[in-house]
Image (tube, helix red, strand yellow):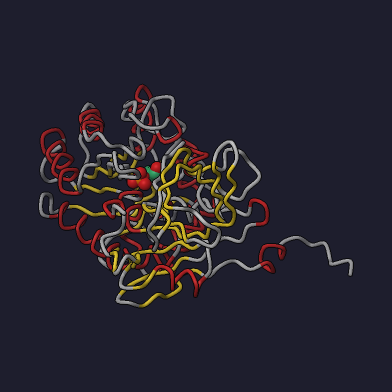
Amino acid sequence: MDLSLYPPNAELVDGRLTLGGCQVADVAEEFGTPAYLVDAAGLRQRALDFQEALASRHPRSQVLFASKSFPTPSVMGLIADTGCGLDVAGLGELLAAERTGVDPSRVVLHGNAKSDAEIAKAIEMRIGYIVVDNLDDVARISQQATEPVPVLLRVSPAVDAETNPAMATGHDASKFGIPSHQITDAIERIRRESMLDLRGLHAHVGSQILNVDQFEQAIASLAQLERFDVYDVGGGLGIRYIPSDVAPTVDEYTQRLVGAVHRHLGTDVELLIEPGRSMVGPNGLTVYRVATVKRGVRTHVAVDGGMADNLEVSLYGQPFDPSIIDKTGRVEICDVVGRHCESGDTFVAGHELVEPEVGDLLVIPATGAYTFTMSNNYNGALRPPVVFCEDGRARVAVRRETYEELLGRDVRKSSS
Ligand SMILES: Cc1ncc(COP(=O)(O)O)c(C=O)c1O
């Protein structure tokens, strides 16, 4: 089993997979499957690595964790406790950020359709910046503010990112930000409002970006505009999902990014970055149990989860690299599928697994980002727990949903 896609504290001990010193099989037994497992020490270290790599090259900087990639106070708080700030989109994420106890001045609010309630809460908390995405935001902030609110303006860097179209956000036709030909007017419009204090610009190219040139292009495009004191260049750094993927390291990424900022925008600006996928993705794995093995035209190995706990395949066609753990044997070519009523609920087709049998544990690495985020109740699935594995101890960070919670929002009373 190749552990290069696994979190840094994953090991094979006597042929058995461990994470943070915990046997994955024991964790699966204690907390059930499917379950999201997080390498807590690995994640903390990753957050520190990002900050060190950025600050050593550009001291006036901040790493903001993009909460949307794992929006729960336990994970956001673990990262914020290392010194990172938090980027949030939506009132729920803002409230989660508040619960972590992070210094509000290190919080940035996004959203292409912000509500009055979100803006009111952001103003009340005195967060670092509200990112203005459209002119309606300008009106909403003006109406609610009683003193000037620090804002950034999200602009299109006009970069067609080399990623799945659903993850490309930096082009002029994107629903996010102000398209290039309207930026100058939007800046003027904001400056006419006494309750908005425009400090800088924000641009986000997209997600799962493996070619760092694209970040450099975005920065060069920001330099076509007038100069500001603050630049938030978003997140987007891609990660390895399958063995053939090649992803830039945090060092390569920050070196190229800061180089471009210094060349195009100056050496004394405040520089913010918002990594999400690249922060949590490599530090999480999902553990399932094999529910059925059907040997027909193809061999379908179905696990006890699927698109309810991982929408990345259906949404972005993301390939994954599942393995059956803790056993050796003959390799078989299988389709690894989920338990939901969609043919598209397939993790991977034509994949090598070791002699799959009902009851085996199957693990998918690199599932730390956007899986918990988009978990859902398809076919009445209960959303899985999040378990931190560290120093030989497994502790629950988010417990599994219950059937009472699943049915609790519907008002129909039981007929029995
Ligand atoms: C504004 C903004 N910042 C940061 C991110 C995080 O991106 P990623 O998870 O790819 O690092 C996103 C996600 O698309 C985003 O929209």
Residue 62 occupies quadrant: bottom left
- Residue for point 50% across, 39% down: 315
Residue 210: image location, x then y, percent: 27, 37
Question: How many discs appear?
Answer: 0
Quadrant where the N terminus sits is bottom left
Residue 126 occupies quadrant: bottom left
Instruction: Classify residue 43 as left or right of residue 255.
Output: right
Instruction: Classify residue 72 as left or right of residue 209.
Output: right
Residue 246: image location, x then y, percent: 25, 39
Residue 63: image location, x then y, percent: 26, 54
Residue farthest to the right, as pictured: 416
- Residue for point 32% across, 60% down: 105
Instruction: Classify residue 402 as left or right of residue 203.
Output: right
Residue 160 against residue 356 in the figure, above or below: above
Quadrant where the C terminus sits is bottom right
Q: Residue 74 versus residue 57: which sits nearer the camera?
A: 74
- Quarter of the render that holds ligand 1: top left
Instruction: Classify residue 376 as left or right of residue 136.
Output: right
Residue 94 appearing in the image:
no
Residue farthest to the top, as pictured: 181
Q: Residue 269 versus residue 318: which sits nearer the camera?
A: 318
Residue farthest to the front, as pictured: 330
Residue 249 appearing in the image:
yes
Q: Residue 1 versus residue 34: which sits nearer the camera?
A: 1
Q: Residue 136 versus residue 321: which sits nearer the camera?
A: 321
Residue 352: image location, x then y, percent: 41, 44
- Residue for point 36% across, 78% down: 393
